[in-house]
Image (cartoon, rainbow, N blue to C red):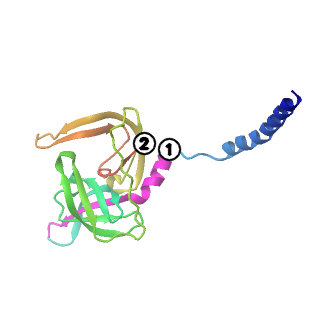
Amino acid sequence: MRMRRSRLRRARSLRKISAPRCFTTLETNTLPSPARKAYEVIRPSIVRVRGLAPDKAGGEDTEKSVGTGVVIVDKGTILTNLHVVLGAKRVQVVFADGLESDATITGVRPEHDLAVLQAQTIPDDLFAATMRSTADLALGDEVVAVGFPFGIGPSVTAGVVSGLRREFRSPEGKRVLTNLIQFDAAVNPGNSGGPLVT
């Protein structure tokens, strides 16, 4: 019995010594928000995508569309939305480190509004984002949208998944997009093609 009591006393005294240290650390260090942590992970893989075409006078190329893309292979393969680059005579991407490069469209999936680009020049330390399945995504899950609204950014917004497997038909009825994720994070023109981080 005496040995047990001494062990208990020793354990209690250790708790008394260590508890204030833990409390002080949490009190003085602000933990980053989930949105901030998600942004810091995805930021090196985000690119600004510009659709260019000659101006009406046939002179220099001007920006006709702007959107966002995400590097999915570190060799310069980028995923974006098809409508960002559709009809562009030339596509240009700007990487996280500021490097600009022309890019070519190497694949499209119109039913999902997706396009795959290949950059001609890439940074030395290019990071690819980790893609995941949406099979276990559920209503109410928190998500973070990163992109270049109105060409400005990158910008970060956060929200929740509010719908799955949505379908959208264009007003003319010519295009139907399927298997869409509906979410309530604020996005604007220019966010198109950017990642939805979970």
Tag 2 and tag 1, C-beta contact below 8 Å: yes
x 45%, y 51%: residue: 39
Quadrant of the snapshot with the N terminus: top right
Q: Which residue is mark 1?
A: 34
Query: Label for residue 24?
Result: none
**Amino acid, disc 2:** Ala
Query: What residue sits right under mark 2 in the picture?
Result: 158
Q: Please, is residue 125 above or below residue 168 in the view?
A: below
- Examine the image and state in which quarter residue 138 appears: top left
Q: At label 1, which amino acid type do we have?
A: Pro
- Badge 2, how many Cα within 10 Å: few under 14, some, many 20+? many
Closer to us: 27 or 64: 27
Q: In the displayed structure, does residue 44 sit left or right of residue 83?
A: right
- Residue 24 located within the stretch drawn in magenta: no
Horizontal and vertical percent for residue 98? 39, 67
Q: Which residues make up the magenta segment? A: 35-57
The location of residue 111, given as percent across then percent down, is 17, 45
**Above-or-below relation of 111 to 137:** below
Quarter of image, res 23:
top right
